[in-house]
Amino acid sequence: MKTLELNTGTQPNGWRARDGRLWFPTTKGVVVVDPAHLSFNAHQLPAHIEEMFADEVRVNLAESVRLAPGTRRLEIRYTAPNLSSPERTQFRYRLEGFDEQWVAGGSQRVANYTNLSPGHYTFRVGARVETGKWSDKEATLGFDLRPQFYQTSWFRLLCGLAGLSLLWAMYRLRVNWLHARAAVLEERQRIAREIHDSLAQGLSGIVFQTEAALMSMTRAPNMTSTHLVSARDLAKTSLDDARYSVWNLSPPVLDQKNLKESLSSMARQLARGRVEELDFHSSGTGWNMRPEAKHHVVLIAQEAISNAIQHGHAKTIWIDLTYAADSMRLSVSDDGIGFVPDRGVQQPARGYGMRNMHHRAERLGASLDVTSEQGKGTQVSLCIPRLGTFAKLWRRICGKGIARVDG
């Protein structure tokens, strides 16, 4: 079958167009040809972008196109030259960065877009004659839509940082609140320990000395003044301890004396008239101990002596203070009735005092051993290591809240 090729908009001599078909007269009759069976060798139509309007304002396409932030409506007008049959020209377009596929524009010569996101876009448009092939001569237009300040990356980064800062601030507030609660609880426990370890022991000694003074007024008047002096000294010491408990400051008495003098003074005040013999022994070169650490050591010894007097009913108490190059050892022994720690026969007051002693030993970074046997007395041994520079630094890095022992 022979194919008749026609150029678009032209007809060979003798052809007539009628009712959408081509008619050709011959000697044997008329030949009717349906255009659908004809092959048109149409020339390709180049598309051309004419104008662009952004929010009804014409954009200059001669320069690099950068649309203002907040542009909401975009209109792009295009065309393709086809003087013979412009109504048969069809278009398709695509906005790269927005359209995933080509959009069939038909015979319309305008494309509209609204509410585009900020970014870079490329508009492409192609043309063809009806039923023909799409032209390879596409028109393109690249443009940028600038973002609003709240659509920029730096603004989002700042918002993210602000959000993280807010979360961090809320976290720190929560942590500080928990720390404040823990500090209140710790302060209550500290005051309770101070009252038990110092005030209670001092008041107990005052009561004892007062009772002894009242008894001696009739039996031994010459001993009355001795008991009253002891009661007065205990009252002064208890007052200093009370001030320390409230303000958490180093007691003035302890600040003015070294550890040996503080232990000796405390032991003699507490045991005067209550035990038959108090033996205090010290050896080695003493350290320049800090007041806080010295306070803990004195109160540990005071608790041990008070337990020996009140619960152990001791008649003799031995105190041994030994300084070595790498440690300091304090031992308080008595000949009292003793107790069995594993069976828990100690009285509640002693049990609370033991907990305080262990707590103070932990604050010193020391070890505390309590050995006792019924009928053979009790021995309390405290060993405080003398840390080197690196050991102190390591404890600080690990966050171990211990009292500094030496200056």
Image (cartoon, rainbow, N blue to C red):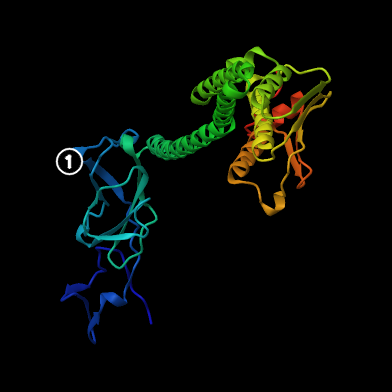
Q: Residue furthest left?
A: 19
Q: Residue furthest top?
A: 256
Mark 1 surroundings: few (<14), some (14-19) or many (≥20) residues within 10 A: few
Q: Residue furthest bottom?
A: 28
Residue 378: quarter of image: top right
Q: Identify whether 147 is placed above or below 217.
A: below
Q: At numbered mark 1, what does the secondary structure look like: helix, strand or loop?
A: loop
The residue located at (36%, 76%) in the rendering is 3
> Which percent across, then down, holds residue 43?
34, 59
Quarter of the image that includes the N terminus: bottom left
* Number of marks in the rendered image: 1
The residue located at (18%, 74%) in the rendering is 20
In this view, the residue in front, 151 or 98, is 151
In this view, the residue in front, 56 or 133, is 56
Q: Is residue 311 visible?
A: yes
Residue 210: quarter of image: top right
Q: Identify whether 150 is placed above or below 131.
A: above
Q: Identify whether 8 is placed above or below 231.
A: below
Q: Is residue 146 visible?
A: no
> Which percent across, then down, holds residue 31?
24, 82
> Which percent across, then down, holds residue 158?
40, 35
Judge from the rendering whether residue 311 lies leftward or rightward of residue 145; answer left or right.
Answer: right
Q: Identify whether 61 is placed above or below 407.
A: below
In this view, the residue in front, 189 or 166, is 189
Disc 1 marks a residue whose amino acid type is Glu
Quarter of the image that includes the C terminus: top right
Mark 1, residue position: 56
Residue 28: quarter of image: bottom left
In this view, the residue in front, 84 or 253, is 253
